[in-house]
Image (tube, grey):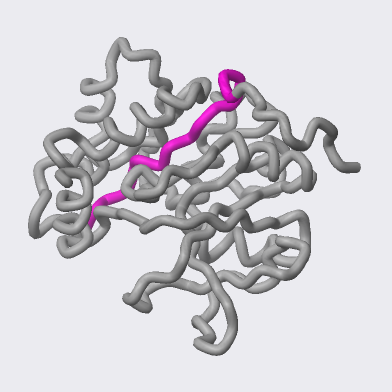
């Protein structure tokens, strides 16, 4: 059954946000090796600061950081700032990192996002939240336009906005999108997740194809700091 009040921007103050900040940042180590990847400075401040400031600026609720590698640096930086932490004792992957936040998530629907990427054209999180609820989705992925590099799995949408192919080789002759690393999830998703280490992108999302698994496409450039080249590009974006 569809939710009512389609065009009303819902208050996000009751919507939790999980930020995945536990990655090892292996590819970025030639430039940044003394801190967690999410704490790499971009345009004069930690990338994670920029992400959190944006989320607080649009009125999001509790922010939960899934932390692992060099986590004490992150905990110290955000001590006393109302941030919650879900700590990994060993690497859990993107999926295990989300599952590990289950005891801290209090909202019926919540956002999940990678701590090392964002869209240069801000996502309307109110619209994403409404789209997710109106479609009774279990998981909604924000989808960005493809980039020139081919190091991503293509996502294909049906006319009903359901994802019908995920993380597959791009087809130059068919419209496809790139996973932007921002998601809206219903709390019941935790019941579908295994315990332990697993990847959202390779282990979990492909199993949702055919179900209540939707795509929310947006414009703008996906900015991430996952590689030295993209880190340099991100500094240019945020310094301009």
Relative to residue 60, is residue 28 drawn left or right?
left
Q: In which quarter of the image is the N terminus?
A: top right
The segment highlighted magenta reads 12-26
The structure residue drawn at horizontal position 15% and vertical position 44%, both measured from the top left corner, is 239
The structure residue drawn at horizontal position 86% and vertical position 42%, both measured from the top left corner, is 2
Q: Is residue 127 magenta?
A: no
The structure residue drawn at horizontal position 43% and vertical position 48%, both measured from the top left corner, is 92
Q: Depth check: 11 or 87 in front?
A: 11
Residue 111 percent location from the top left of the image: 55, 37
Q: Depth check: 237 or 116 in front?
A: 237
Residue 49 percent location from the top left of the image: 27, 31
- Quick one: which residue is furthest to the top in this view? 80
Relative to residue 95, is residue 54 drawn left or right?
left
Relative to residue 49, is residue 233 drawn left or right?
left
The structure residue drawn at horizontal position 69% and vertical position 44%, both measured from the top left corner, is 131
Quick check: 161 above or below 89? Answer: below
Q: Depth check: 99 or 206 in front?
A: 206
Q: How many callouts does the rendering have?
A: 0
- Quick one: which residue is furthest to the bottom in this view? 173
Residue 228 percent location from the top left of the image: 16, 61
Quadrant assignment, res 184: top right
Quadrant assignment, res 27: bottom left
């Amino acid at each position: 059954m569809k939710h009512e009040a389609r065009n009303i921007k819902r208050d996000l103050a009751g919507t939790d946000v999980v930020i995945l900040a536990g990655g090892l940042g292996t590819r970025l180590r030639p430039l940044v090796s003394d801190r967690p990847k999410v704490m790499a400075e971009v345009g004069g401040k930690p990338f994670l600061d920029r992400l959190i400031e944006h989320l607080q600026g649009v009125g999001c609720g509790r922010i939960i950081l899934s932390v692992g590698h060099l986590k004490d640096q992150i905990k110290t930086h955000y001590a006393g700032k109302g941030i919650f932490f879900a700590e990994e004792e060993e690497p859990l992957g993107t999926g295990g990192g989300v599952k590990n936040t289950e005891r801290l998530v209090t909202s019926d629907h919540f956002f999940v996002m990678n701590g090392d990427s964002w869209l240069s054209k801000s996502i309307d999180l109110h619209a994403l939240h409404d789209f997710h609820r109106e479609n009774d989705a279990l998981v909604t992925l924000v989808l960005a336009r493809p980039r020139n590099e081919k190091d991503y799995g293509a996502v294909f949408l049906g006319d009903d906005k359901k994802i019908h192919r995920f993380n597959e080789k791009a087809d130059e002759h068919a419209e496809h999108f790139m996973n932007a690393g921002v998601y809206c999830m219903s709390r019941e998703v935790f019941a579908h997740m295994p315990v332990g280490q697993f990847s959202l992108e390779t282990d979990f999302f492909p199993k949702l194809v055919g179900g209540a698994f939707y795509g929310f496409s947006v414009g703008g450039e996906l900015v991430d700091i996952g590689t030295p080249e993209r880190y340099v590009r991100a500094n240019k974006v945020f310094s301009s």
